[in-house]
Image (tube, grey):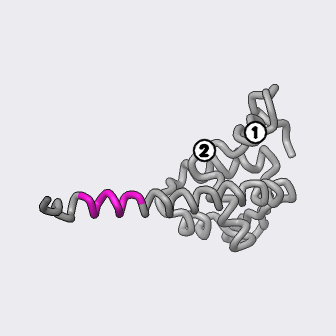
Amino acid sequence: MTSSTRRGPYICGIDAAMDVVSGKWKSLILWELNNYGTRRFGELRRGLPGVSEKMLIQHLREMEEDGLIHREVYREVPPRVEYSLTEDGKSLNEALRPLGEWGTKRSARLAAGSELIDQAFITPPRPR
């Protein structure tokens, strides 16, 4: 692992963790590698609809620098590069699991609330 360009010193552990996972796609890259194992660049890109090539390259480089992923380059023609989680990446994924569960529950709750709001606008008022 190379020396990190992260800002530090940190106020607390959450500050340090959020510095490493900040970025729209990083937690999704962690999830993709955790669920599907070693992936090539194209596989990652297809698994993350909406991510640009430039942003995926940037996030992968930062995550490699932070020791979250391993980049394996095979010296063959055509060149092949594979990405996988390191132990730090796996442990970070485990730490993020409760956050994902919280997000799933919150999304369901908000969706149920918006359905109630939608019904209020669709259902005509009852006569008094």
Camera-side residue of 40 and 103:
103
* Residue 117 drawn in magenta: yes
Give the amino acid type for the residue marked by disc 1 in the picture. Ile
Most common SS among magenta residues = helix
Q: Residue at x 76, y 39 (%)?
A: 14
Say above or below: 42 vs 29.
below
Does the magenta run of residues contain 86? no
Drawn side of residue 68 relative to residue 36, left or right: right
| Residue appearing at x 70%, y 71% in the figure | 35
Label 2: how many Cα within 10 Å (few below 14, some 14–19, many 20+): few
Residue lying at 35% horizontally and 63% vertically, measured from the top left: 115
Q: Where is residue 42? Give x, y as percent.
A: 59, 67
Residue 26 coordinates in the image, percent (x, y): 64, 52
Which one is nearer the viewer's eye here, 113 or 87? Answer: 113
Residue extending furthest toward the front:
128
Query: What residue is disc 1 on?
Result: 14
Q: Is residue 116 above or below residue 17?
A: below
In percent of width and height, residue 24 lies at 56, 48
- Say which of 22 and 62 sits in front: 22
Q: Does residue 121 appear to the left or right of 18 in the view shown?
A: left
Q: Secondary structure at mark 2?
A: loop
Left of 73 or right of it: where is 40? left
Of 31 and 76, the residue lying toward us: 31
Which residue matches tag 2?
23
Residue 10 figure quarter: top right
**Mark 2–mark 1 contact, CB under 8 Å?**
no
The residue under the point 76% across, 50% down is 64
Disc 2 versus disc 1: nearer the observer:
1
Instruction: State the extent of the magenta-drawn residues as a range.
Output: 113-120
In the rendered structure, which disc, 2 or 1, sits on the residue that comes first in sequence?
1
